[in-house]
Image: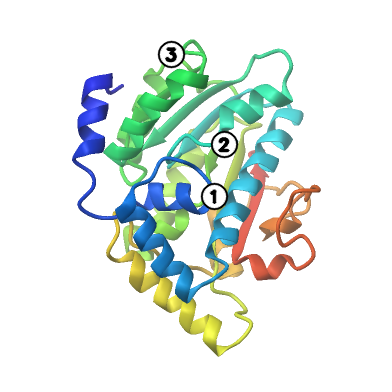
Amino acid sequence: MINHDDALKAVENSLDRPSAARVYDYFIGGTTHYAIDRDFAEKVRERLPLIGQYCLTSRQFLGRAIRQCVRAGVRQFVDIGSGLPTAGNVHEVADDTSSELDTRVLYIDNEPIALAHSTLLLADTADPERHHAIAADFLRPEDLWDRVTESAVIDVREPIALVINAVMHFVKDEQNPDHLLRYYRARLAPGSLLVLSQMTNENPVDEDERQALLDLLEYYETTTNPAFMRSMAEFERFFGGWPMLEPGLVYAPAWHPDDHTVFAGAPSQSRVIGGVARKP
């Protein structure tokens, strides 16, 4: 855990280029972003006007998935690539769904700036006995899982909801995501749930959108997290063949939509795919 003074220093030293975590926070209506992030975000929005709604789709999917995990009986959550605390954090949604306040959440991010903001912001809303934020890298699975095992929050012998939301589009195929997901799936206890989503370039509505999605990837090469998109078929393999909770792998707005779901009437326009699978 980073201390308060180091967190402030990390924030001050992070303003030389856009932070993907802060840009996302800006797009979903958060407050933890700076001029360099907003300028980048608006440049992206000029080329891809619906980018804010795509990001909101990911965040809304996360909330609905967490509620379903709690209703399915899971009380432990490991959120890898958690980004910045903002509206609808995993621990807030989980506590709101379970009146017993018996859920535990471990937030993990490899961006020092995200961890710094987590340290500063979780203090306002979290229960330190049940909610922690730690630094670890999704691309270093052995080290990350050691930290999960050593945490005072998670019991790896019991079912866990492993949340990797809006992260896989920042992991390119040359970084061997198949090995990474295989490793994490193997560490989960039976009955655990795997929550995955990412942006997709499948079925653009026209040539202009296809090019705009390519331009988006080029823009993100200048941020802290270059991006990569996949089709539904390319993404499905990350669930390892585990049984999917209904309705399976779908465009995110089609996954248990509610009255607030953006793109509910046209899920494929969301550019986001997602699903939840249970370990046998």
Using the image, tell me which numbered label, if any, was put on residue 130: none
Q: Nearer the viewer, mark 1 or mark 3?
A: 1
Q: Name the residue that disc number 2 marks.
A: 87
Residue 275 percent coordinates (x, y)? 65, 51
Q: How many marks?
A: 3
Q: Is residue 43 above or below residue 93?
A: below
How packed is label 3: few (under 14 Cα within 10 Å), some, or many (20 or more)?
A: some
Question: Vertically, is 181 above or below 198?
Answer: above
Nearer to us in this view, 237 or 276 = 276
Q: Which residue is mark 3?
A: 152
Report x, y in % for residue 145.
38, 31
Q: Residues within 10 Å of mark 1 (few under 14, many from 20)?
A: many
User: Residue at horizontal 71%, vertical 12%?
Assistant: 100
Residue type at mark 3? Ala
12 left or right, relative to 192: left
Quarter containing the N terminus = top left
**Toward the viewer: 134 or 151?**
134
Label 2–label 3 contact, CB within 8 A: no
Q: Are marks 2 and 1 in contact (CB under 8 Å)?
A: yes
Q: Quadrant of the C terminus?
A: top right
Numbered disc 1: secondary structure: loop
Q: Which residue is mark 1?
A: 28
- In the image, residue 2 sits, relative to residue 115, either above or below, namely above
**Residue at figure coordinates x 55%, y 89% from the top left:** 207
